[in-house]
């Protein structure tokens, strides 16, 4: 019960920080503009090379991968700056650590507004794809999609909290660290191209992260034909099993990192450290 | 008059110096500022490879990645800079100093240009080395002219935006975030803007990077000439006009916004 109260209160706080600088309409426009334009970059790149034809499987692969990757990018970026904002800007982190709460769940709560905003952006992007760009969807493997979705979200949150925890020990690097990590995932997870295009040495790196399996699961659930040759021979069950295992490992790793870093941060007096730059 | 000029020149150098020194002060920032555009470059290169695009498109992406360093600098370290200065309490010191506000902006621009060029050079070398692209311009003097005009116009736009951002509070962060991707699209960082059509392309040309990138693409790549939006001569002329226009507007806007800020009491307002 207390954990739920922590998550709920942190979520509400996160929402106020995210959204209360603007009127609701302005905020919604803001929340969907950036994702739409990042999608347009890929659409225009595709059109320049492939011409006007966007009803192909490769287009759907790129488009859907980019749309769902927004969760990873936004959650990492959102939770990654929580520590620095709370510690150095609002100077509230010490009070959070004084409160009788589990800080891991506080950070989890701070992810919730980002998830909500991103859900809206993903929906708008997919609808725009179907409506304007003739994006072809088929839900032949819909159970895979339904089961994969929450697993990927859990893995993303776990990775985000692990990264945010690391910022307890750093100066104001949270923004760069999370953006940089999201950039690495964007590249290696094959969000916008099949992973066989990557150099051979990067493929095992790609297969080490749950995000890769998550995006593949979602795309397989929503597309008529497969695109990635690497996953072509994989059954839905195998994909789901590996996604589950990598997600569980991510959560365990995230909790361990969080506890370890908090221990060091307390020991070194970093919980109330202010860098002033 | 002579003393005033000397004081302003010292102010320009003083403000630029912070950035020139700061460019190498924080190693992790250097790493991330180079790594992030390189990651985007790599991703878009692989997208073009997945699409089976001609090899020159890899060069388009590298050129776009280089220009990203300048755009991000203008957005985060020029446009929103007065917001940060307000938050850290420096802005009032600038305003009471016996110098022109334009000197501060010019110093910021020169220092930022230096900072971004160090990043851009590494992205260029890294991109060429990693993706095996040949980038030799057909004319070095034209390339230098296009680049310089593009930078003057771009940093002029940054100075203008900085004046406007003077009035913003916490929304400055959000607005900067919001402007990032649309400019990547409208300026054709990773694809030729000819695909927009003439009318939209002309509107997009109000952003100096649009014509700057298009002209540089023409100078570097055969495919750049095939996908050119306008002849280089026209692009140079428009960039020259934009340079003068943005610098003039920046000066006007700065005075107006400062007066407005004083009347509304927003120049020293923090954390709102």
Image: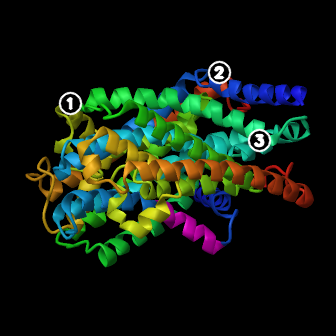
Looking at the picture, the colour scheme in use is rainbow
Q: Residue furthest left?
A: A233
Q: Is residue A203 visible?
A: yes
| Image position, residue B255 (x, y; %) | 82, 52
Secondary structure of the residue carrying tag 1 is helix
Q: Are marks 1 and 3 on the same chain?
A: no
| Image position, residue B161 (x, y; %) | 67, 52
Which residue is more in the foreground, B176 or B213? Answer: B213
Q: Residue B21: give its label.
A: 2
To which quarter of the image does residue B89 belong?
Answer: top right
Q: Which residue appears at 36% of the width and 65% of the height? A: B196
Q: Which residue appears at 16% of the width and 58% of the height? A: A236
Kindly report which numbered mark, 2 or 3, lies closer to the viewer in this rendering.
3
Q: CA distance from mark 2 to mark 3?
A: 21 Å
Q: Which chain's residue wears label 3?
A: B
Q: Give the magenta part as a residue range.
A: A24-34
To which quarter of the image does residue A16 belong?
Answer: bottom right
Q: Are marks 1 and 2 in contact (CB under 8 Å)?
A: no
Q: Which residue appears at 72% of the width and 40% of the height? A: B105
- Which residue matches tag 3? B102
- Which residue matches tag 1? A201
């Amino acid at each position: 019960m207390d954990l739920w109260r922590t998550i709920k209160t942190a979520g509400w706080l996160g929402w106020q920080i995210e959204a209360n600088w603007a009127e609701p309409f302005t905020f919604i426009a803001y929340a969907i503009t950036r994702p739409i334009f990042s999608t347009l970059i890929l659409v225009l790149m595709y059109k320049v090379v492939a011409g006007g034809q966007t009803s192909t499987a490769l287009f759907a692969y790129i488009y859907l991968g980019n749309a769902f990757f927004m969760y990873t990018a936004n959650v990492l970026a959102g939770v990654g700056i929580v520590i620095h904002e709370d510690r150095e800007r609002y100077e509230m982190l010490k009070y959070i650590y004084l409160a009788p709460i589990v800080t891991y769940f506080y950070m989890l709560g701070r992810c919730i507004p980002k998830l909500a905003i991103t859900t809206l952006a993903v929906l708008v992007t997919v609808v725009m794809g179907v409506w304007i760009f003739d994006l072809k969807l088929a839900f032949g493997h819909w159970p895979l999609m339904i089961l994969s979705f929450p697993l990927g979200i859990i893995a993303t949150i776990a990775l985000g909290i692990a990264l945010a925890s690391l910022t307890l020990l750093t100066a104001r690097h949270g923004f760069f660290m999370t953006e940089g990590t999201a950039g690495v995932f964007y590249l290696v997870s094959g969000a916008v191209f099949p992973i066989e295009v990557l150099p051979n040495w990067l493929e095992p790196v790609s297969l080490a992260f749950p995000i890769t399996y998550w995006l593949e699961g979602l795309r397989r659930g929503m597309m008529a034909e497969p695109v990635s040759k690497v996953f072509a021979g994989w059954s839905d069950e195998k994909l789901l099993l590996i996604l589950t295992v990598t997600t569980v490992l991510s959560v365990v790793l995230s909790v361990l990192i969080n506890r370890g870093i908090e221990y060091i941060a307390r020991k070194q007096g970093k919980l109330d450290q202010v860098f002033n730059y | 008059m002579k003393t005033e000029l000397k004081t302003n020149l010292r102010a320009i150098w003083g403000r630029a110096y912070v950035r020139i020194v700061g460019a190498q002060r924080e190693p992790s920032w250097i790493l991330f500022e180079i790594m992030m555009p390189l990651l985007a470059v790599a991703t878009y290169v692989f997208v073009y490879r997945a699409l089976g695009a001609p090899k020159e498109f890899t060069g388009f992406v590298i050129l776009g990645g280089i220009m990203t360093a300048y755009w991000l600098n203008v957005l985060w370290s020029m446009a929103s800079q007065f917001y940060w200065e307000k938050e850290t309490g420096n802005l009032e010191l600038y305003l009471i100093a016996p110098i022109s506000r334009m000197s501060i902006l010019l110093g910021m621009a020169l220092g930022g240009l230096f900072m971004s060029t160090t990043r851009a050079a590494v992205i260029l070398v890294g991109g060429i080395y990693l993706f095996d692209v040949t980038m030799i311009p057909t004319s070095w003097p034209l390339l230098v002219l296009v680049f310089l005009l593009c930078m003057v116009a771009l940093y002029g736009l940054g100075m203008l935006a900085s004046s406007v951002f003077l009035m913003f509070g916490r929304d400055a962060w959000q607005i900067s975030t919001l402007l990032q991707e649309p400019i990547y699209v409208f300026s054709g960082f990773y694809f030729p803007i000819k695909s927009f059509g003439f009318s939209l392309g002309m509107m997009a040309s109000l952003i100096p990077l649009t014509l700057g990138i298009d002209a540089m693409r023409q100078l570097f790549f055969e495919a750049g000439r095939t996908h050119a939006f306008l002849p280089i001569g026209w692009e140079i002329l428009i960039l020259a006009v934009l340079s003068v226009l943005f610098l003039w507007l920046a000066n006007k806007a700065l005075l107006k916004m400062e007066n407005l800020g004083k009347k509304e009491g927003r120049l020293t307002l923090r954390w709102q």
